[in-house]
């Protein structure tokens, strides 16, 4: 009897370790609605010039495919990377460019790291958030050096590196805020109140 109780307790603990509502199976219309609302709200916040005068703007469109890939899997992460990347290109004044390619790659990699276990998810999330920020900043640094938008400015790699290093802590904080806010919105959009399973086993057994 004690062995049976231990098995049931372990089963409840294992179920409690699973990701909450975000990773559960949902109808297509609900996912599309939540993602469309997320894209509209976060893109509007990101490009609002009045909000980000002193600090770097959180790159919501960069982190959407990462968070969705980590919480929902590769197909949805890939699709969100494609759409969010297109929006990044469009809002930046360029069509079908680097943003789409970068977004698709992020969504695919995040999908490979997908896990519906809380502990595994949080470990991977805490590693992926700074890794993506650093990789993106390094990519932008290299592009600004080899393909400068304003050729009248001095092309000094040391100056570009110093400027990027000075703003890096603020970018990391801004992107951490972006990732946490996306997770919160996904939790709200996919919220599901769990029903306690009824068991005929009394606690006294």
Image (cartoon, rainbow, N blue to C red):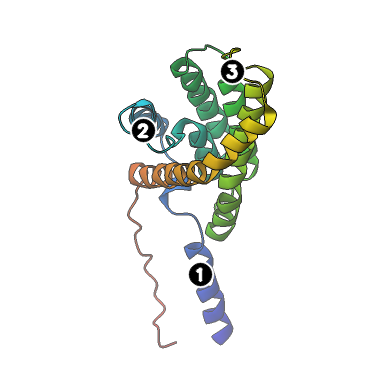
N-terminal of the two: label 2 or label 1? 1
Question: Is residue 108 something one can see in this rendering?
Answer: no
Q: Which residue is mark 3?
A: 153
Q: Quadrant of residue 182?
A: top left
Across and down, in percent, residue 185 comes to 36, 42
Determine whether, in the image, residue 80 is placed left or right of residue 57. right
* C-alpha span from label 1 to label 3: 60 Å
Picture residue at 63% right of the left edge, 31% below the top: 159
CA distance separating discs 2 and 1: 47 Å
Percent from the top left, x then y, of residue 107? Answer: 58, 33
Q: In the image, 53: left or right of 79?
A: left
Which numbered dot is residue 53?
A: 2
In the current view of this chain or complex, which residue is farthest to the left?
50
State the image coordinates of residue 196 (x, y, percent, origin top left). 35, 64
Q: On screen, 85 above or below 127?
A: above
Disc 1 secondary structure class: helix
Q: Give the mark count.
A: 3
């Amino acid at each position: 009897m004690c062995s049976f109780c231990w098995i049931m307790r372990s089963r409840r603990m294992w179920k409690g370790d699973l990701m909450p509502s975000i990773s559960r199976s949902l109808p297509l219309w609900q996912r599309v609605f939540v993602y469309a609302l997320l894209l509209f709200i976060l893109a509007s916040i990101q490009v609002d010039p009045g909000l980000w005068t002193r600090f770097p703007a959180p790159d919501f469109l960069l982190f959407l495919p990462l968070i969705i890939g980590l919480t929902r899997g590769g197909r949805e992460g890939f699709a969100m990377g494609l759409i969010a990347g297109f929006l990044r290109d469009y809002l930046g004044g360029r069509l079908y460019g680097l943003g789409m390619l970068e977004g698709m790659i992020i969504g695919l990699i995040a999908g490979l790291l997908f896990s519906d276990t809380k502990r595994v998810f949080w470990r991977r999330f805490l590693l992926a958030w700074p890794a993506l920020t650093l990789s993106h900043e390094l990519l932008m640094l290299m592009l600004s050096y080899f393909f400068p938008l304003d050729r009248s400015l001095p092309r000094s790699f040391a100056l570009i590196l110093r400027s990027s290093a000075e703003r890096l802590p603020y970018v990391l904080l801004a992107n951490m805020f972006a990732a946490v806010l996306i997770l919160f919105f996904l939790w709200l959009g996919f919220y599901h109140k769990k029903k306690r399973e009824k068991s005929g086993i009394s606690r006294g057994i």
